[in-house]
Image: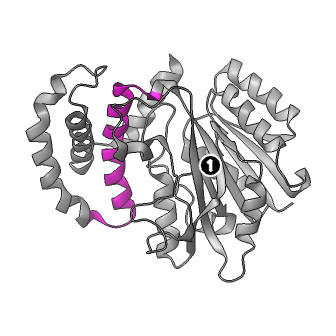
Amino acid sequence: MDLTVCICTHNRPRYVQDCLDGLKRQTVARDRFTVLLVDSASGETAAAELGSLAAAHDARLIRLDHVGVSLARNAGAWAARTRFIAYIDDDAIPATDWVESILDAIAQPGRPPALVGGRILPKWEAPLPTWWPASLRGVLSIIEHEGRGEYRTPAVPQGLEPYAANMVVHVLSLLAAGGFGGAVGRYGNCLLSDEEVQLAWTLQDAGHSVRYDSRIVVHHQIQARRMEPAWLLSRMYWQGASTVLTRRLLHQPQTVWRELPRRLLVAGLLAPAALIPHHTAFLLAARWRFAYAVGFIRAALGWHVTEAAIEQAAVAVAA
């Protein structure tokens, strides 16, 4: 067995079905990889469906009692019995040569990788609205760049980051780095982010090879509910907070304080835009910048972001 494929999910058996079906169509033999399904505290009905799916697709199932994508991914790493683990989101469908491309990427001569990020192409459930800012396609976990190379070097575009919707990690390097940080990452439907970025830069700063390889492709099912102004505003609010947490976790607090005055200015200038109803796209460019600034400011000034995310997720599960 060369590779563990890890799918982390919470209450989404329909998407898991599509992902598992994609893994059945791989160009390599099934004995080249194993599938691990981590159920992050799904409700009773969804949990039963996930159990049936795991049995039907020869996948090993791990059930967690608490929500949290970082917790789920770390559980997958501890359960892996292979050198590498490939993370794929439950709503992503792997290309037919996905595993084959991963095995080729980690077998390349030279310095072995600690982390390899792949290409993430959109599979739209609804058309992308015309009002959607072109600069924010990335918040939908889309990566369309073609090429290969080390992150944060001229080999890849500036600002390109790995997303755990399609990411391969050397298991021992992951565990030695402390795994995915629980301070960031999704908790249920709470949109805290950047756990994979924190891990990638931690590994790279420690001297490991952290690469991008566009041959490793998944098709990300972009949910129709994300095509709403309210979702984008929430996503940018939590992204502002996530940015602060990630910089501090990477021991870069000075960058937060340098940016804080600019975010305060943006929030002050754009505050009237917050009066516009969330469901409308009117003046959206100003409103998403305001939302990001507010999340950034609150986190910078001491808001307990992670605790708030966990509490919000717990309320949603109880409901």
On whether residue 231 falls in the magenta region, the answer is yes
Characterize the magenta stretch by its predominant secondary structure.
helix
Residue 290 at x, y percent in the picture: 20, 38
Q: Is residue 188 magenta?
A: no
**What percent of the width, then of the height, locates residue 151?**
49, 69
Q: Residue at x 72, y 61 (%)?
A: 102
Of 314 and 246, nearer the camera is 246
> Residue lying furthest front in this view?
130
In this rendering, position of residue 37 left or right of residue 131: right
Residue 80 visible in this rendered orientation of the protein: no
Which of these two is toward me, 64 or 220? 220
Q: Which residue is mark 1?
A: 73
The amino acid pointed to by label 1 is: Arg
Question: Which of the 4 image quadrants contains residue 7?
Answer: top right
What residue occupies the far bottom of the structure in this picture? Answer: 110
How crowded is the residue under tag 1: few (<14 C-alpha within 10 Å), some, or many (20+)? many
311 on left or right of 69:
left
Q: Mark 1 falls on what kind of element? A: helix
Q: Quadrant of the N terminus?
A: bottom right
Estimate the x, y position of residue 112 in percent, counting from the top left. 67, 77
Q: How many marks?
A: 1
Taking the image as shown, residue 196 lies to the left or right of residue 220, namely left
Residue range in magenta is: 226-253
Residue depicted at x 39% and y 29%: 231
- Residue at image point 87% right, 32% down: 56
Q: How is the image coloured?
A: one colour
Picture coordinates of residue 205 (x, y %)? 46, 74
Q: Quadrant of residue 123?
A: top right
**From the viewer's perspective, is 24 left or right of 213?**
right
Judge whether 52 appears above or below 265 on screen: above
Task: Look at the picture and state if 313 lies above or below 236.
Answer: above
Q: Quadrant of residue 57?
A: top right
